Image (cartoon, coloured by chain):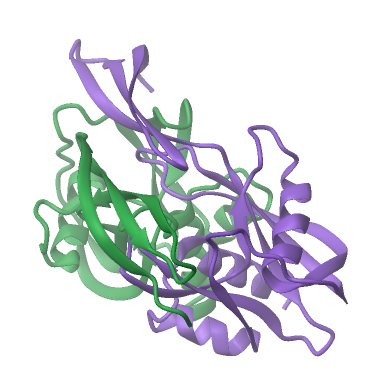
Chain colours: A purple, B green
Amino acid sequence: MEEIRRIKRELAYKGRIINIYKDYMALPNGHTAVWDFVEHKGAAAVVAVTKEGKLLMVRQYRNALERDTLEIPAGALNYVGEPKEQCAARELEEETGFRAGKLTWLMNINTTVAFCNEFIGVYLAEDLIPSRQHLDDDEFLNVEEHELDELLAMVFDGRITDSKTAAALMAYKLKRG
Amino acid sequence: MEEIRRIKRELAYKGRIINIYKDYMALPNGHTAVWDFVEHKGAAAVVAVTKEGKLLMVRQYRNALERDTLEIPAGALNYVGEPKEQCAARELEEETGFRAGKLTWLMNINTTVAFCNEFIGVYLAEDLIPSRQHLDDDEFLNVEEHELDELLAMVFDGRITDSKTAAALMAYKLKRG
């Protein structure tokens, strides 16, 4: 493949959970193009399976979609480079009130490669141990339990659209289900 | 669930393929929070299956990841509200040089719901008809053919991380494979 090379990266805007940059790119045809780059520090997400084989899901309001979504538990890293497994364990406990007796890697996801480096490590949590939910100050969500096949039906008919959730549920089905 | 309400949306930055806003949110605890919102006009993507049962994939450089990725063919809508199926047909032909004799809906994806409204309609293209590749001026990519099971192995071991690609390949496997 012909070489594409970045000449310069310029900060354009600092947000709350993302920063926006202009990437000045040298293209194989001699053009210089300015491409968007959205910087995210990374995240972890968890497929959490109860003793009864049900999955713990969270329902929350998403301002970007102007509606509630049903998602697997997930959250951003506390700092760049935080071990994803540590983040997964923390977010599971904070959001659902369960600790994972067993936590294994399921898959890695880049949510939207055309303009963002957001990377999510997805883990499978088993042998759940009741603990205590402790949400962030400005975090509001409800926890629900669902059957895997019910959730997959929601992926296939468009009721669940969140990419990490759709991918993680299907990966669990294909790898373990 | 307690009500979260947007008070104001303020444009913070206009990019090439995205715009960034500050959403001022009234939270159930009485706080006002400023949340990021990244506006994207939407996209379509295609699982394209050849007569031999192989899948057409594109390999291209992604500045956000600073590396090449292997993805299903995809592209942004030409305008907000463009029918996703029309976009899918166009992007398939432009990127791979094949038209779809048959194009059916496979799934819908929101790539990253925590801050972005990007929505991708994913379609299954069959009965491919040779046509002509015609890339955009500043678009550089290579087309490859792969077996589904080879691609799924790449999803499961972390070589393919693109969320739309991972989700689409697994949905095709579970729905049709």
The answer to which quarter of the image holds residue A114 is top left
Against B93, is A21 above or below?
above
Residue at screen point 24% across, 71% down? B103
Foreground pick, A64 / A33: A64
Image mark count: 0
Residue at screen point 15% across, 54% down? B90
Residue at screen point 22% across, 53% down? B9
Foreground pick, A74 / B156: A74
Q: Residue B120 vs residue A125: left or right?
A: left
The answer to which quarter of the image holds residue B156 is bottom right
- Residue most extreme to the front: B30
Foreground pick, A64 / B122: A64
Q: Residue B159 vs residue B79: left or right?
A: right
Q: Quadrant of the N terminus of chain A?
A: top left
Against B42, is B29 above or below?
below
Foreground pick, B113 / A164: B113
- Is residue B3 in view? yes
Against B70, is B104 above or below?
below
Expressed as whole percent of the image width and height from the top left, the position of residue B53 reads: 44, 64
